């Protein structure tokens, strides 16, 4: 059987199956992840609809949008029907989603536990492919004064300026700080370097009456707390 070149175009589908029309008439929440991606790419290939192509792309990352957000333009271009422009569109959309999550997380203004710190910072650093070190500055009511990235490194590690950390704390009038960094490898075990840095910052803070309340290692789905494990 010979297929017509336009037979898989979304415009030839039943109206109920068209993602754009479905979004307009039924709302965005009813659309599947594949249908949302299909709207981004607009069309598939001669032998595959945009939705079917989107399903294949999602299946390649175990239907995990966080994993899809980590892929590269060349990775997406391996799929027939995805050129550079469509690949860039997908990556840009997912990056906007990640930034939205990060902004929403930063609106939370009080820290009550290690879990609340994880909820604050996981959307920002939890699924990054490189290591970043962040500090949360708190007042005496544990309200967040500022959340700041101190350094950005490679897969294996990062460098933190202890003096800059404490200088910012003094400028903000912070009485407590919480340290956090991500492990792109997914391991939650603190390294010797992690422990040494924690001790260094704790010692620096003691002389300034600024307490290091915790140090979290954050991954995509879990975290390790120095305070919870009594390592502070």
Image: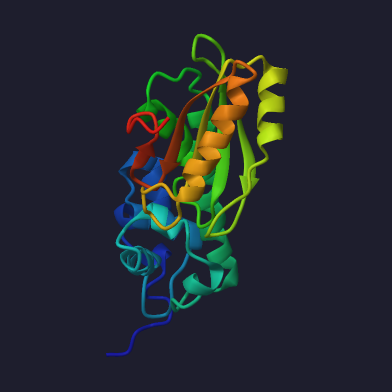
Describe the colour scheme in one phrase: rainbow
What residue is drawn where x is 54% and y is 29%? Answer: 202
Residue 126: x and y in percent read 45, 45
Q: How many marks?
A: 0
The picture quadrant where one finds residue 18 is bottom left
Query: Horizontal placement of 104 versus 63: left or right?
Result: right
Residue located farthest toward the top when viewing the structure as drawn: 141
Return the residue nearer the eye: 131 or 124.
Answer: 131
Give the quarter of the figure containing the C terminus: top left
- Determine whether 151 is above or below 60 in the image: above
Query: Horizontal placement of 81 versus 30: left or right?
Result: right
Residue 158: x and y in percent read 59, 51
- Determine whether 33 is above or below 229 in the image: below
What residue is drawn where x is 31% and y is 66%? Answer: 59
Residue located farthest toward the left when viewing the structure as drawn: 1
Residue 203: x and y in percent read 57, 28
What residue is drawn where x is 36% and y is 40%? Answer: 223
Return the residue nearer the eye: 230 or 100.
Answer: 230
What residue is drawn where x is 70% and y is 33%? Answer: 163
């Amino acid at each position: 059987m010979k297929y017509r070149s336009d037979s898989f175009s979304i415009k030839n589908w039943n109206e109920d199956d068209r993602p754009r029309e479905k979004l307009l008439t039924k709302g965005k929440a009813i659309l599947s992840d594949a249908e949302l991606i299909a709207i981004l790419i607009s069309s598939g290939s001669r032998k595959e609809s945009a939705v079917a192509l989107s399903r294949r792309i999602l299946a390649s990352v175990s239907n995990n949008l966080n994993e899809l957000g980590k892929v590269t333009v060349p990775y997406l271009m391996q799929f027939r029907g995805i050129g550079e422009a469509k690949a860039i569109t997908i990556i840009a959309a997912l990056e906007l989603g990640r930034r939205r999550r990060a902004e929403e997380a930063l609106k939370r203004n009080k820290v009550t536990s290690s879990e609340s710190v994880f909820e604050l910072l996981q959307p920002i650093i939890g699924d990054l492919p490189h290591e970043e070190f962040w500090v949360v500055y708190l007042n005496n009511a544990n309200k967040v004064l500022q959340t700041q990235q101190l350094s950005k490194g490679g897969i294996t590690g990062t460098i933190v300026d202890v003096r800059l950390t404490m200088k910012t704390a003094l400028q903000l009038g912070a009485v407590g700080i919480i340290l956090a960094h991500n492990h792109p490898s997914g391991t939650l075990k603190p390294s010797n370097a992690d422990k040494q840095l924690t001790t260094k910052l704790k010692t620096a803070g003691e002389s300034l009456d600024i307490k290091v309340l915790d140090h979290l290692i954050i991954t995509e789905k879990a975290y390790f707390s120095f305070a919870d494990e009594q390592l502070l």
